[in-house]
Image (cartoon, rainbow, N blue to C red):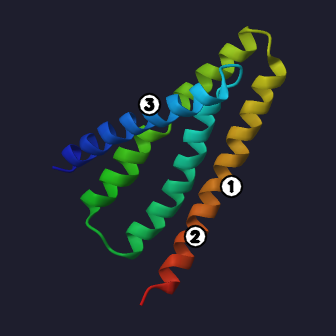
Amino acid sequence: MILLYIALGGAAGAVARYGLGGWVQDRAGFAFPWGTLVVNVLGCLLIGFAVRYLEAVRLAPEVRALVAIGVLGAFTTFSTFSYETVALIEGGAWGRAAGYTFASVLLGIAAVWVGMSTSAYVLQARP
């Protein structure tokens, strides 16, 4: 049964990634993969918050799997990040590729930390 929850969450996360990533990219232009960067950093923030919060409020393992593995696992995408980095390198945009890699890793780590810290704060404020 847990696989069904993960699959349903994955479908929702993939659709959300496609929608938000495309929306950001359309507005930012195509010289830099802003859509994937925004989605991945937001996904890191959300997973940092969700994992700690969902554990603390003691939701069923199926719900935690639906959100963390399904929705957020499908929402972020390391393979797209890797492909876009290689595409920038192949296009001779070494500086952009380095900037994208640096920004993705540092912002991703920072976003997970902020998400976890925010979750801890929210949990302390609960009655």
Of the pair 24 and 71, the residue shown nearer to us: 24
**Callout 3: 10 Å neighbours few (<14), some, many (20+)?**
some
In this orientation, does residue 77 appear? no
- Relative to 83, 94 lies left or right: right
Can residue 69 be seen here? The reply is yes
What residue is disc 3 on?
18
Measured as percent of width and height from the top left, residue 48 is found at 53, 59
Could you say where residue 92 lies in the image, as x and y percent from the top left? 80, 10
> Which residue was labeled with disc 2?
118
Kindly check if marks 3 and 1 are in contact, taking CB atoms under 8 A apart as contact.
no
Rounded to the nearest whole Å, what is the CA distance between mark 2 and mark 1? Answer: 12 Å
Whichever of callouts 2 and 1 sits on the residue coming sooner in the sequence is: 1
User: Which mark sits nearer the N-terminus, 2 or 3?
Assistant: 3
Residue in view at x 45 percent, y 61 percent: 50
- Residue at the location (67% across, 17% down)? 86
Q: Amino acid at mark 2?
A: Thr
**In the image, farthest residue toward the front:** 27
Disc 1: which residue? 110
Q: Is residue 122 above or below residue 49?
A: below
Instruction: Please name the amino acid that badge 1 sits on.
Output: Ala
Spatial distance from mark 2 to mark 3, Cα to Cα?
Answer: 26 Å
